[in-house]
Image (tube, rainbow, N blue to C red):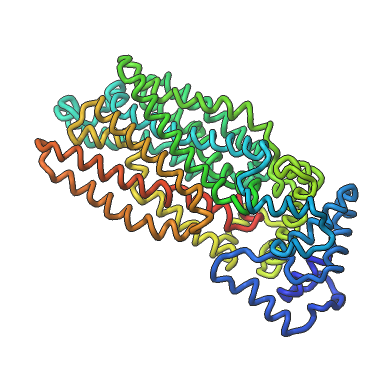
Amino acid sequence: MSGVKAHIAQNLDVPEHPGPGARKQSIFADETHRSQSMAGMKDNSTGEIKNPLAGIPKDQLLQDVDNFAADNELNDILPYLRKGALAAQNPRGIDHIEELNDEERQLLHFETTHRWKHPKTLYFTIILNSIAAAIQGWDQTGSNGANLSFPVEFGISDTGPVCTAAGTCEANSWLVGFVNSCPYIAIALFAGWLSDPINDYLGRRGTIFLAAIFSLLAPIGSAVTQSWGQLVACQTELTSNEGIGMGLKEVTVPVFSAENAPTNIRGGLVMSWQLWTAFGIFLGTSANLAVKDVGRIAWRLQLGSAFIPAIPLVVGIWFCPESPRWLMKKKKYAKAYKSLLRLRGTPFQAARDLYYIHAQLVMEEILVEESGLAKNGNFFTRFGELFTIPRVRHATQASGIVMIAQQMCGINIIAFYSSTIFANAGASVTTALLATWGFGLVNFVFAWPAVWTIDTFGRRGLLLFTFPNMFWTLLAAGMCFYIPESSRAHLGLIALFVYLFDAFYSPGEGPVPFTYSAEVFPLSHRE
């Protein structure tokens, strides 16, 4: 076992070797020190990730670096690994690390003073991930606009004299709702569960590429359907073409962003998922407006237009470096270093992050062993451990709460039915689509503040501020339906409070669940 792993194992009181035999003594054998270390690693009320290298003696740390390099054929970058390990161990004391030269110290200071200055490859990766998010938003708003006309085309209209005379308005409302919900039913029943084995086998890039193929084909298929049953099949082929594509992207892209991003801007980059989902919603509402007057095929163009952003995603994803953490999970350390070199820009920074990630993975492995998790468990074993192992159960509970809150806060109703809501409030088709366009614009504009605030005020701080404001604004929007429709204030106030709700949602409950869920799980259970 490596020196780092032995140190962490002793801190957690885990045997260094699973078989018989005494463990080699070290300076951490003192019982008092071990108890303090255990408390420091386990009793973590703030949720802050502790540095796994803290407290390791310099000679032991450097010996472990030498062993790590030898074991993984990285001797050609050993000088960088040794310096990087020392910098990772004490990031606030880099001026006192004598092994570093002035250029390397300047690089580390530059990371702090210019935290958004990074190689183009990193931003290209984030842009591709943002395109994946935009597809998500565009898909939703395509359905939003199409809801005004496709039910009439397929004979399942849930408003107006035809269904009223036939007595089918209520039944048709269920059918329209089922069509809209099919992608999410597929995500819940299939895509969410398939993401684990697909990510494990194909990696992050391969999974996103597969999702992009589905996202390219599904809107085209939806646009040429001839019945609501065919539309259901297209939106949920297997049962879901679109659902599988949306689900795999939704699960994988935030994780891919988190694993590629530097620590000091990780929250801002990972939340780009929600930012560009909001941009996709805005583009979708713009497309809905652009084709509203083309006649009976308007809803087909509204659904089909979502294939446009899938094209650059399919083409571009293979030009991004694979996730270094996924490569290291597969013991491909040399490839992980090459990925980090493209993402960090210099050999010193890439080597530092390579060794630090290695130390984090070692800590996770020790915690897995200490907690009783199955070291080589399969999908079903890992699923059971989400609820049985304290470390993972706490992550499941916390991420589940923020995710469920996001889905139940009311935003999905507005995202799918805002055009219908405004139409029911007395707006014409054009006015309803314009009001929905305003919703998309507000959603996008107010997502920007979270880029700067999520790493400043924290994930929980944003939720504590925005949730109460989401509550009263959505309540007020609902109460405004009691204003007589003859009053000009009826539609205006409904739109106002929907926009205010949207403005509070976008920097809070919009981005935080994806960022939070991508960070809190150990790598073994992240998919």
Q: Please say whether residue 244 is visible from this viewpoint.
A: no
- Residue at image position (22%, 42%) is 494
Left/right of residue 240 with respect to residue 480 in the rendered view:
right
Image quarter for residue 56? bottom right
Percent across and percent down for residue 397 are 50, 62
Q: Residue at x 90, y 54 (%)?
A: 70
Quadrant in the picture for residue 488:
top left
Q: Position of residue 418 (x, y in %)?
A: 30, 36
User: In the image shown, does 158 or 94 lie closer to the viewer?
Assistant: 94
Where 352 falls versus 32 (above or below)?
Answer: above
Q: Nearer the viewer, residue 163 or 27?
A: 27
| Depth check, front residue: 17 or 307 | 307
In the rendering, at what x and y percent does residue 409 appear?
A: 35, 51
**Residue at horizontal 68%, vertical 32%?**
318
Task: Relative to 403, say whether 238 is above or below.
Answer: above
Q: Position of residue 210 (x, y in %)?
A: 61, 33
State the image quarter where residue 207 is shown: top right
Instruction: Choose between 246 and 380: the one closer to the eye.
Output: 246
